[in-house]
Image (cartoon, rainbow, N blue to C red):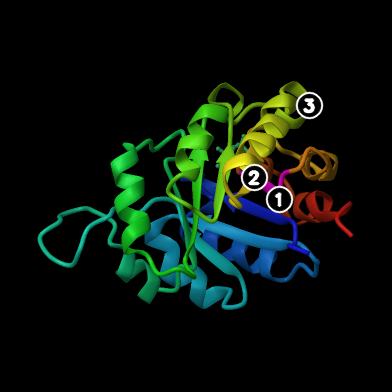
């Protein structure tokens, strides 16, 4: 049985950058749960977060399919791995890439490296599945950062993605946008998702630890 997964995307929220990223990662690392907690951090913070919370699974928010060499400003996958990244988001709604980018990245990454490809809808999720990422995360862009959870407003995009993906692959489906509490997480799982991808629910919380505890509270 796969553990339900809760991925917290630190984005560039002030509460989740630099020292605050390390502190949030330490809080996540201290939580005892049967869920799989993951922090998707800024590339600037990757090394320091891995050092501050060595037990925590840490991902990047983006990578570029480039080799060592003359690639100014790009995010080099093998340096990320060397610095402790165990996975990455790709094609997030706030950092879209073309499908060739995803395909090339998948070809160069080692099998054990986790790739969560983000999709705006069911048809994009199906296309991304053809590259065989570890997960696709379906997130309606208009609900990202909002107060209402995709699981309440648009449950059919979650169940529809799960159904469509199951027909063509074994890729796990996550959902995101507006996820705030344990009920949203359980609803996602009931709809067939393997877990959730969220940001503001934690990064804007006055008490991130309490919010994280709530998020995992209904997971057995
Ligand atoms: O990557 C997670 C994300 O885009 C959803 O953001 O703030 O709606 O949880 P948020």
Residue with the mark numbered 2? 174
* Residue 209 pos. (x, y %): 75, 57
Few, some or many C-alpha atoms within 10 Å of disc 3 (few <14, some 14-19, many ≥20)? some
Magenta region's main secondary structure? strand
Can the viewer see residue 121 in this picture? no
Residue with the mark numbered 1? 194
Which numbered disc flags the more N-terminal residue, 2 or 3? 3
Few, some or many C-alpha atoms within 10 Å of disc 2 (few <14, some 14-19, many ≥20)? many
Q: Give the Cα distance between marks 3 and 1.
A: 17 Å
> Which quadrant of the figure contains the N terminus?
bottom right
Q: Are marks 1 and 2 in contact (CB under 8 Å)?
A: yes
Q: Residue at x 47, y 66 (%)?
A: 113
Can the viewer see residue 140 in this picture? yes
Q: How many marks?
A: 3
Residue with the mark numbered 3? 152
Magenta range: 193-198
Q: Residue at x 57, y 29 (%)?
A: 122
- Quarter of the image where one finds residue 176: top right
Q: Residue at x 46, y 33 (%)?
A: 93
* Residue 37 pos. (x, y %): 67, 61
The extreme front residue here reads 167
Between 160 and 47, the one nearer to me in the picture = 160
> Is the residue at mark 1 in contact range of ligand 1, meaning its CB lies under 8 Å from it?
no
Say which element carries label 1: loop
């Amino acid at each position: 049985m796969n553990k339900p997964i809760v991925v917290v995307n630190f984005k560039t929220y002030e509460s989740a950058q630099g020292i605050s990223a390390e502190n949030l990662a330490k809080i996540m690392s201290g939580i005892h749960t049967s869920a799989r907690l993951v922090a998707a951090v800024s590339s600037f913070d990757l090394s320091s977060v891995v050092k501050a919370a060595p037990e925590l699974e840490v991902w990047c928010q983006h990578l570029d399919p480039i080799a060592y060499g003359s690639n100014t400003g790009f995010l080099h996958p093998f340096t990320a791995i060397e610095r402790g990244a165990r996975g990455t988001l790709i094609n997030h709604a706030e950092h879209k890439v073309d499908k060739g980018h995803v395909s090339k990245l998948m070809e160069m990454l080692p099998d054990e490296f986790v790739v969560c490809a983000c999709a705006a809808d069911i048809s994009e999720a199906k296309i991304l599945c053809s590259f065989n990422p570890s997960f696709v995360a379906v997130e309606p862009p208009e609900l990202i950062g909002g107060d209402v959870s995709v699981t309440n407003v648009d449950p059919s995009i979650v169940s529809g993605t799960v159904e469509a993906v199951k027909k063509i692959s074994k890729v796990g489906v996550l959902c995101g946008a507006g996820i705030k509490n344990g009920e949203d997480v359980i609803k996602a799982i009931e709809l067939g998702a393997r877990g959730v991808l969220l940001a503001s629910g934690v990064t804007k919380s006055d008490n991130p630890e309490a919010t994280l505890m709530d998020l995992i509270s209904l997971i057995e």
